[in-house]
Image (cartoon, rainbow, N blue to C red):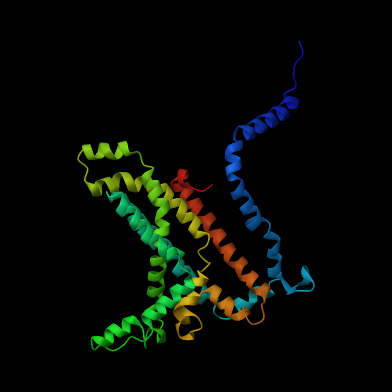
Amino acid sequence: MSVVNPKKVAPYSVKRSLGKKIWNSKTLLLMCLPAIIYFIAFSYAPLPGIYVAFVDYNYRKGIFGSNFVGLKNFEFVANSGKLWMLTKNTILFNVAFILLDNLLAVVVAILLKEIQSKMFRKVSQTMMFLPYFISQVLVGLLVYSLLNSDTGLLNAVLKSLGQAPLKLYKTGDPWPLIIILVHLWQKTGYNSVVYFAAIMGIDSAVIEASMIDGANGWQKIRYIILPSLRPTIVILLLFALGGIVKGDFGLFWNLVGRNPILYQKVDIIEMFVYRATVSDFNFSTASAVGLYQSLIGFILVLTVNGIVKKIEPDYSLF
């Protein structure tokens, strides 16, 4: 009796099995195709451009024809004396954004779920969505119209009450709070969508059973809704940590602009690089800072994901 060599059969069976899986999942793969193309085009194809951070970029010579300078472009920021201040401000702002964004988004999603009137719920969602779609240039103009010391609405009200006007653009102390509040006003409604969808995906029979057993509203939120949201919260936090060293340039620039009085409190890496490179368009320096930010974000994601994997393996990204 002849014996079939498994080494010759295995590769064919594996290929056939893989091809069959691909064919059976062709609909799902087609649905994922736009996302795959997006990440290839905007995340993987530009990777060779990292080399710009290590050269003295010359427009005529191109990226790979420019002179290699090693870490000289990184020294631009490191030797400026502001690296620690810029990194600290950027990270602290992003930590506040991440924590408060997720906290308020969860609260808003739960409140929306508890609204009985569908019409009122839709109107509320629409009203909270609107700030996200407002240009940050207009947001900066609105804040200036509200807070400037001469004609701002806030100071007009204070003057009418016989109070001294607030000169907020001449002191940096209140601006971290102002920027955080403006960010939350603009992003909370949009960020609540994911949590609201997760809440709507909870089995209604579980919630109805808890109400029959006498659970009140707070107990329903604490023991059913919040535990169900925990995987979503952890995954979104891990994703957000990847950009913790990248500031929201549009928001900061349109609120602060070229006001050096406020820089000590609210200056971030992107604003510093923009001010330093806008005159001569030094793409090498900008690429070096971008690589520095990406490496720190990558290390943070790996570290936090490793911690989550040890505590709750099911909630880790990989």
Look at 49% across and 85% down and name the residue there: 260
Work out which residue is located at the far top of the displayed protein and give it: 1
Give the side of residue 224 with respect to residue 211, left or right. Answer: right
Q: Is residue 213 above or below residue 266?
A: above
Taking the spot 62% from the left edge, 53% from the top edge, the residue there is 38
Q: Is residue 23 above or below residue 5?
A: below
Using residue 111 as the reference point, say whether residue 80 is left or right of it.
right
- Residue that sits furthest to the front in the current view: 119
Along the viewing direction, whichever of 156 and 266 lies nearer the viewer: 156
Asked whether the viewer can see residue 33, the reply is yes
- Give the quarter of the figure containing the N terminus: top right
Q: Is residue 173 visible?
A: no
Q: Nearer the viewer, residue 197 or 285?
A: 197
At x 47%, y 52%, the residue is 307
Q: Position of residue 131 (x, y in %)?
A: 41, 65
Q: From the top left corner, tell me how far across and down residue 26 is, in percent.
A: 61, 36
